[in-house]
Amino acid sequence: MLNGLRFRWRELWQRGRLDREAQAELDLHLELAAAAKVAEGLDPAEARRQARIELGDPEEARDVLREARTGQWLDTLARDAALGLRLMKKRPAFTAVSLVSIALGVAGSTSLFAVADAVVRKPLPLPDPSALVRIYDSNVAKGVQGSGVATANLVDWRRRVHRLRGIGGHYTMGRTLTVGEESEVVLTAQVTEDFFPLLGLPAAVGRTFTAEETARSVFNVAAAPTGADPVLVLADGLWRRRFGADPGVIGRIVLLERRPFRVVGVMPPGFAIPDPDVQVFIPWGLEGDEPRDQHYVSAVARLAPGATLRQAEEELEQVARGLAEEHPRTNEGWTASLVPLQDDIVGDSGRTLFALLGAVALVLLVACANLGVLSLARGLERAHETSIRLALGATRGRLLRQYFTESLLVCAAGGVLGAFFAGLALAVLKRTSAPVPRLHEVAFEPRAVLFALMATSVAALVAGLPSAWRRAHSEAAPTLSAAPARVAGGRRRHALQDALVVAEVATTVVLLASATLLVRSYHRLQSVDPGFDPRGVVVAPIFLDMEAYGSGDKSRAYYRTLIDRLEALPGVVSAGGATALPASPLGPDFERPVWPEESPSDESVRRPVWVRMVTTHYFRTLGMRIVAGRDFNEGDAPGADRTVILGQSLARRLWPSGNAVAHRLMVDYSTSGIYPYQVVGIVNDVRFGGPRSDPRLEIYLPHAQRPYLVMNIAVRGTGDPRLLIAPVREVLHEIDPRKPAHAMQALDDLVGATYSRDRHVMAVLSAFAVVAVLLSLLGVHAILLHRVRERTREIGIRIAVGADDARLLWWIAAHGLKLTLAGVMLGGLLAAASSRAVSALLFGVGLTDPAAILAVAALPLVALVVSLHPAWRATRIDAAEVLRAG
């Protein structure tokens, strides 16, 4: 066996030496045969001649020896590749079009696969991630689905549910971090005792919180920590940015909301629970006596060993029913459900990504079909060469390998180029604000490389194999003395080319129709009236702290001073603030039950409504309309009667038979009591979550009567709102240098962010559609040009016997139109069959939207225009030259 391996090694790597040894052996046989004949009395020259005749052609013998060697296919492949490279260089236009076609298809499909793979398939970077779940509260009777959980309920769940090995709660908000003299607002997560242990990922530097540290971390009603010796854990990004990745940060004291906190740990890179933007973690101790009707906490849990999701959910529902019996006033009708944490993080982004991945796969198929059409057309130019090689004894298998190698080279080069573009696209994507969960985990990993290789292989098979098979199985020319004549072929000869073009067009129709629908959907979103005017408004989220602004008077004074200063700035029209602003993700946003004072016991009129605290001038700043009553004014002061303004929908629901103004509204603040409010106005409804959201039931309270520390300040200017960011920041610094704004943005940008997914999907799919249209038109052009060159002799004869230019133009162009119409009809059927994939992404647009129909209908017209160029080339054929050539 060892000798056999050594012999195979010599055959593979010492081919030159073996060639010389074979030549020497053949020469020896020739000399021996010639010597034998000389011994018989023949002349040496004649003896050598006869010996050559008897032994046969030495070149043929050497070829037989080479064919039997191990690795001979490498030599053949190298020769085929060398020929293919020469041909690519000889036809730069064909090569460029082919490379770009394949590169675009491979780049798009690979980059989207890498994103989908990281977001949907790749497990969360945590120990045993499949056991992690998210808990949601629901109350069908109140129309609440998938809300946060109540803190006291979470404590009881931890004690009573045994199929969950730990339940952790977290709540995020902006808090001001001061390191040295520099202050900034950072997103901070307050987390319960179970949070880090159930996730199972230790700190990279230092440690996470102990049970004692969590137990003493008590918060007041303003979400401000009041316990002794507070500690915090840093996220890796903040540690590197503000502390230079110094391991000595452990034990260092920093200020969070002006209180000294001791750093005890740093989380590892890539830790993104509960959110990639969280920079600081602080402990949160829950004792179980917190309110049960304030559902704002996000809860995560880990399944116990051996427990299934359904078993844990059933036990959780059973405990929820028990709590409803124990606390009927707050828990009646409430139940809990479990969702795998990975599914919860991904949401519906997975469906969107797979829809885009399917679209880019269609683009890749269009590119492959286009390359196949070009290859078939190019085969005409080498028909004479193929005939000669067949006549000289080349086997069809050898020709098939040669021609397929040529296509494989083009696809391989395009695949390498596409993989490079895919890596570049992923790097650019990670620097954008694309609404893709787990975007920080996306990378050009080996699976993406393998996918690029598979996509390239599929492209080579689809684009190269039919053409290579067709050319290798052509017939040898009956005569080799003249150049090949270009004559018309039968229908079977052109069936494959026509089928590829029809498939191209059909695939393009699917992409074009989908892209047009998404463009229409996006414009519909932009045209939706959100109930406020975001143009010209800049938003500055402010997070005051209990240390300096704990009393209501201080908070009122700060915001009154701030708004007065802002309204005095040049170019500012008005300024106002609210605890939560439409389209802004920051600020306290909560629901409370309300009912008319005259119906205290009628449960049917109770409504959970969203509560906003707003300053004067808020409605004017946002461009909202007071439809009845009045706006808040200076008379709505702390000592005056409590007043409230209702959203229009809420007013109609509570007082459907008349005007709600002058009625009294009861608001249940749970443990803080129930308070009556005088309705002084009604304001138009707003789509708080953006154009895709429905108007909420909302009430607005004057900030002067119910001050809050956290407010979103809106400033309306006369020009570009981004020009106000610098002066607003300067005013904030002058009032309190340690209270900067958190991520100041134009309200237009915040509204746009609510449908940024629609914008990105529309842009990507539109780009795919444009590429597909260009490739399919190129395919139509190529096949007609091929047909003209193939039928040169026939066209020349037609011209010679009197065919006019108009008839020739229509004869050629009509064939392209016929193929396009066939593709449009087939594509319409495919688009109807795949409508479900795109319907979920649409807003206010039907699948039979006229714009999509017009876009598809315009494709044959454009194809007809493209077809005119090959048709015009046909009219330029010189009939006399064709007839002379025979």
Image: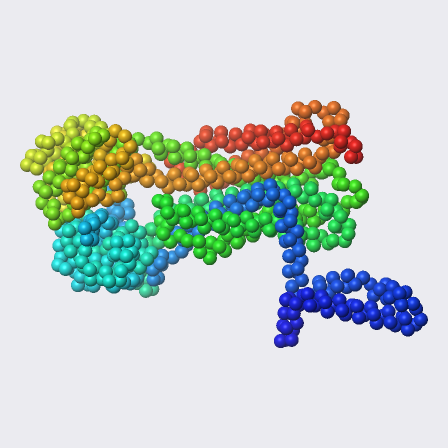
Q: Nearer the viewer, residue 252 or 855?
A: 252
Q: Nearer the viewer, residue 718 or 451?
A: 718
Q: Is residue 337 above or below residue 26?
A: above
Residue 484 appears in the figure:
yes
Q: Nearer the viewer, residue 138 or 431?
A: 431
Write down the quadrant of residue 634 in the picture.
top left
Q: Residue at x 44, y 56 (%)?
A: 445
Write down the quadrant of residue 285 in the picture.
bottom left
Q: Is residue 124 above or below residue 636?
A: below
Provide residue 37's location: percent of width, then percent of height: 89, 70
Q: Nearer the viewer, residue 26 or 825?
A: 26
Provide residue 170's location: percent of width, then percent of height: 24, 53
Write down the quadrant of residue 572 in the picture.
top left
Q: Residue at x 46, y 29 (%)?
A: 850
Q: Residue at x 16, y 41 (%)?
A: 734
Provide residue 153's location: percent of width, then percent of height: 20, 54
Provide residue 356's location: percent of width, then percent of height: 45, 44
Q: Residue at x 65, y 41 (%)?
A: 377
